[in-house]
Amino acid sequence: MNSRRLTALDGLRGFAALAVAFYHFFYHYHLDYGHQFSVPAAFQFGYYGVHLFFLVSGFVIFWTLSRIKHPFDFIWSRFSRLFPVYWVAATITFLIMYLYGPENRIAQFSDLLINYSMLQGYVGVRHIDGVYWTLTLELAFYFWMFVLFLTRQLPQIDRWLFVWVLIAAALALTDLVELVPMRLRYLLLLDYIGLFAAGICFYRIWDGSANKITYSVIALSLLSLYVQYPLPGALIITVIYGLFYCAINDKLALFSYKPLVFMGTISYSFYLIHQNIGYTIIQLFYQYNISPYLGIACALVTGLVLGTLLTYTIEKPAMGYLRKLYKESSLLNKIANKISIRTIS
């Protein structure tokens, strides 16, 4: 596979992470606590970095599924990638909030324990960090992809996605989606399935397995944006689709720019650790009458430093160790084989 294209995915992640961070430190902080300066409205659009993450996730997860042999391979791959560094980041955030954080962001120890499962959004428990709501959606997406893998429906993924996106768009168009309980909306990905679906379809275009339905899903996903989002948001996500397509087809050198690629490498750890700790730092600068711009810069640098440390001391070592353990463990391989045998024909 073309390594430049892999590099572009990291660059996309890096761009998304920075967009979300600037949204949080400028626009969202201003909404929650108030900055002492006028915040340009353009910073609100950094929120759509999350939507770019969902596109990348759809692309990468289907790529992962195309390379695995046993269902348990997928479970272990996602567990080793997501959970160890998440546990550490959640614990650090919990402790710093408890000691120094804004009052409305201090959680209970019982909340932390439930957060360790990533299921807090489904049981009504607060997120230790504000960004963790997206992990609730990611987990739901992995669950449904695992179900399709188990039932051997991945070759028909385009048909499933077309129906799924169509139902979500119809519910949004008729406002019936508002009658669906929020936890069920999260589980069924009703507000975001179009993005995950587009990511999967972009992967199928990239690897040469696309068909007419694949392109129809992308077109339907694009149309659904204008039903589910305000016009400016829909236009921005449309541009994101275009940038994504250009990046994975090696048409945008920007996303292979080394600082963005590095940012992409640390993006998961950075994303997990930046928001609440960043808000705490900004508030401390305000309390001591130090320039809020310096506070924002310090929050960003702290997120980058912590994100780098977590990536290279926790995320990558833990992932490498757990995947090596999986390959060498006879017990885990027995579990994998049993699940494989029970896979529905």
Image: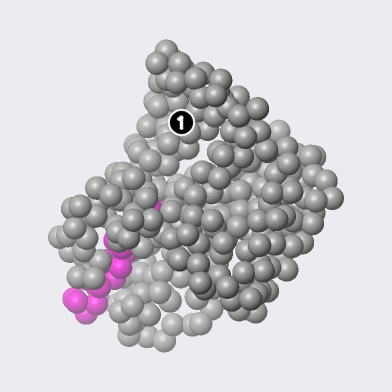
Report whether residue 327 is seen: no
Q: Nearer the viewer, residue 81 or 20?
A: 81
Q: How far across and down, in percent of the image, does residue 283 sit?
A: 25, 73
Q: Is residue 205 above or below residue 293?
A: above
Examine the image and state in which quarter residue 175 appears: bottom right
Which residue reaches farthest right? 212
Badge 1 is on which residue?
76
Examine the image and state in which quarter residue 32 appears: bottom left
Is 275 contained in the magenta span? yes
Which range of residues does the magenta coloring cover? 270-289
Is 74 contained in the magenta span? no
**Residue at the spot x=54%, y=57% of the render?**
189
**Residue at the spot x=66%, y=67% of the render?**
169
Report whether residue 322 is seen: yes
Q: Nearer the viewer, residue 153 or 19?
A: 153
Q: Is residue 294 above or below residue 14?
A: below
Secondary element at tag 1: helix
Which quadrant: the N terminus?
top right
* Residue 4 appears left or right of 50: right
Q: Nearer the viewer, residue 204 or 247?
A: 204
Q: Is residue 282 above or below residue 99?
A: below
Q: How far across and down, in percent of the image, does residue 292 sit?
A: 32, 76
* Residue 3 appears left or right of 104: right
